[in-house]
Amino acid sequence: MNKDIIEEFYYLALTDIANGRSITELEEAIELYEKAEEYEACAGILKAVHESGFMTIREIINKVRNDKRNN
């Protein structure tokens, strides 16, 4: 698996969550990517969904900003 693609989808999903996208919508996206056999996308979105359960919206926003600055 390509770690760069996983991380890209991870940050995109975290951004979606911070912007109000529901977990249900992200789970639907996972299903679509799974049908298309885009497993890196699935892994990244799933990672974001799992981690976001332990974070506030402010923490998610700060993580995206800080991690993007460091890369």
Image (cartoon, rainbow, N blue to C red):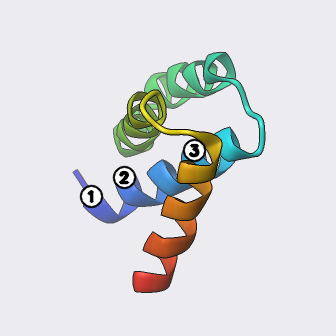
In the picture provided, is 40 more to the left or to the right than 64?
left
- Report if the CB atoms under discs 3 and 1 are less than 8 Å apart: no
The image shows residue 10 at horizontal and vertical percentages of: 46, 49
Which residue, given by chain and number where applicable, does mark 1 sit on? 2
Res 28 seen here: yes
Give the structural element (helix, strand or loop) at label 3: helix
> Which residue appears at 51% of the width and 26% of the height?
30
> In the current view of this chain or complex, which residue is farthest to the left?
1
- The secondary structure type at the circle numbered 2 is helix
Quadrant position of residue 23: top right
Label 1 Cα neighbours within 10 Å, binned few <14 / some 14-19 / many ≥20 = few
> Residue 69, how many percent across, how many down?
50, 83
Q: Is residue 71 visible?
A: no
Residue receiving disc 2: 6
Say which amino acid is labelled 1: Asn
> Do the residues under discs 2 and 1 have CB atoms within 8 angstroms?
yes
